[in-house]
Amino acid sequence: MIFKRSKKVNKYQHLIYLTILILLFIDCDAVTVNEYETQFNVYLVMYNYLSYTEVFVDRTYAIDEPSEPYVEDALVTLSTSNIVDTLFFDEMYGRYVKWYMDIQPGAIYHLEVSKQGLDTLFGISKVPGEFEFINQPNDTITLEDTVIFMRSNGAIVYYCLFLSDGRQDEFWLKPDTLDSLVKIRVGDYIGSLPAGPCEIKVTAFDRNYYNYTFEPDDSLRQAGVTGGLGLCGSAWQETILVYLDTEQ
């Protein structure tokens, strides 16, 4: 009798435990939904060589919520020192834009994106500094020669582009040392560019861009922004024209 009675008690206990687990699951699911918060998701890189600055503004969505390609009714501002610029929404490209914005080397820019019902997103980026090529303009370089330029203050990674007769070679470079000079042996990077005038463009990117592009912490990328997701970055480009001799 004791054995049978014990089995009945266990049966009821299992039903009770199962009910509790179901209730806990429902409760946790409700908490997950209730705790979901919509946030801005932005993308901004400021370039000194462009005649405009653009910010792409989106937001996060719940798993069962239909998404849109952008948020078009936010207030987007960029400021530095005592200057504040308000960007307008460009419907054709789905972006916020400011024309003829003069990006300064070493300047600190603040991004602010706001909209009723959403937390305000703040971003900050310090533009990499100016830098110079050691090579002289119109110099002749061969595949055995080295292109040398000064490091850009605040830059972490460089995008290098060689243009010759409508063709190009490009690569990313992250210097390993703290030397004040960055050296590129031409033959190590240039493939089959033709001989002739060659334009070399080197673009220095800040740490925010590097972290967002090359070393994201997780799937929710956040570099240089608080109160939301995305990137607030900047870049500085210098250019030199040389003559590329590939026949030596």
Image: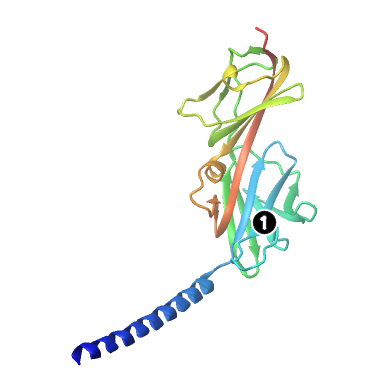
100 vs 23, left or right, is right
On screen, 69 above or below 52?
below
User: What colouring does the structure picture have?
Assistant: rainbow
- Quarter-of-image position of residue 140: top right
Give the side of residue 74 with respect to residue 22, left or right.
Answer: right
Give the structural element (helix, strand or loop) at label 1. Answer: strand
149 w.r.t. 57: above or below: above
Picture coordinates of residue 162, whole percent (x, y): 67, 24
Indicate the position of residue 229 as horizontal and vertical percent values.
57, 56
Kindly identify the amino acid type of the residue bearing the numbered disc 1. Val
- Along the line of sight, the residue nearer the viewer: 162 or 15: 15
**Pointer 1: what residue?**
57
User: For residue 18, what is the image quadrant?
Assistant: bottom left
| Residue 82 visible in rendering | no
Q: Is residue 138 left or right of residue 12?
A: right
Coordinates of residue 7 in the picture (x, y in percent): 26, 86
User: Furthest-left residue in view?
Assistant: 2
- Image location (x, y in percent) of residue 55: 68, 51
136 or 210, which lies in front? Answer: 210
- Residue 138 lies, with reference to residue 154, above or below; the image says above
Q: Looking at the image, which residue is at 72% across and 14% down?
A: 195
